[in-house]
Amino acid sequence: MDFTAFPLPHVLYNRIPNREDENKPSVQRKIDECMQSGIELYNPFFFNKWNLFEWLKKSKSTQQLIPHTRRMRSASSLGAVLRTYPYLYLKPESGKAGKGIMMLKFQEKERLPYRLKVQTTRKSTTYKTATLAKLWARIRKETGHTPYIIQQGIELASSRKRPFDLRVLVQKNSKGQWSVTGVGARLAGFRSITTHVPRGGSVEDPERLLMDLFGEEMTTALMKRVKSTSLLIARQVERGSGFTLGEMSMDLGIDELGEIWFFEANAKPMKFDEPQIRRRSLERIFHYSAYLAHQSKR
């Protein structure tokens, strides 16, 4: 059987769809080989939530965007944070699409003051306990050996009594520069603790949601700030990672006072539900790949 030898590609974009496959030793070896071969490989790995916040803390321009975040190590440290903030989110360091996220509240005057809300695919269940020790046992049962972070809950702007956040896609363009491809909005499902569509969230127009709350003038200013903030974050994440990145999606929240908060970034963005963002995103992947190919030839 004849096999035709093809030349190596100029550019590779790592779109391995899940962490389990990417973490296999054979896959890691192949990624390393590609990076050392002179091929322009971008977005070489999934982000880790803890690393993201560590990178953003290193710059004064982005550290103010981060809710209080720390690794979940012990019951005592969790209790200390819980007494400082009205409620917390517990998130797996390597989670995706809202999987494994829990919400925790401490209501001191209640007979069972600790309230842990656990979300599954379509519903959520609240566990109430009297002591921190019992709460910790329940949390450990839910998390197993998965590393988690603790994050300050933010009172997000809401519509129809449901909070919403913004999904921003940033990509490098044909000149190799970061630019905003599009901004969408996700409205949380009824009683859902996240805004993810697979968990009951809905796709909304960000300007319409913001206009209802803040008016036209402030909405225009907020959208400009969201875009400029997204570019700041993208540059700092790329700087912190130490690798070439070409695109990322990020979740940003706007609180009731109009302040912007960073919650998450994804190195392998899923397809956006908004057709115009999806179409533009595919175009930009080709534009940036052409830019990298031209650079490699030079």
Image (spheres, rainbow, N blue to C red):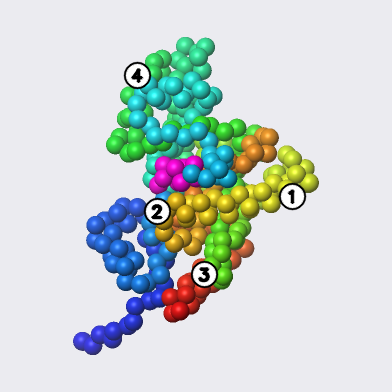
Please report the bounds of the magenta region as a residue range: 48-57
Q: Is residue 120 left or right of residue 282?
A: left
Q: Residues within 10 Å of mark 2 (few under 14, many from 20)?
A: some
109 and 192: which is toward the camera:
109
239 and 196: which is toward the camera:
239
On the image, the x and y values in percent for residue 215 come to 77, 43
Q: Which residue is mark 4?
A: 133
Q: CA distance from mark 4 to mark 3?
A: 52 Å
The reply to whether callout 4 and callout 1 are in contact (CB within 8 Å) is no
Q: Please tell me whether residue 46 is drawn above or below residue 294 in the rendered image.
A: above
Q: Nearer the viewer, mark 4 or mark 1?
A: 1
Q: Is residue 167 left or right of residue 10?
A: right
Report the magenta stretch's main SS: helix
Q: CA distance from mark 3 to mark 1?
A: 29 Å
Is residue 52 on the magenta stretch? yes
Looking at the image, which residue is at 45% across and 15% down? 112
Point out which mark residue 129 bears: none
Q: Please tell me whether residue 77 is drawn above or below residue 66 in the rendered image.
A: above
The reply to whether callout 3 and callout 1 are in contact (CB within 8 Å) is no
Q: Residues within 10 Å of mark 1 (few under 14, many from 20)?
A: some
Q: Which residue is mark 2?
A: 46
Q: Which residue is mark 1?
A: 220
Looking at the image, which residue is at 47% across and 16% down? 113
Is residue 269 on the magenta stretch? no
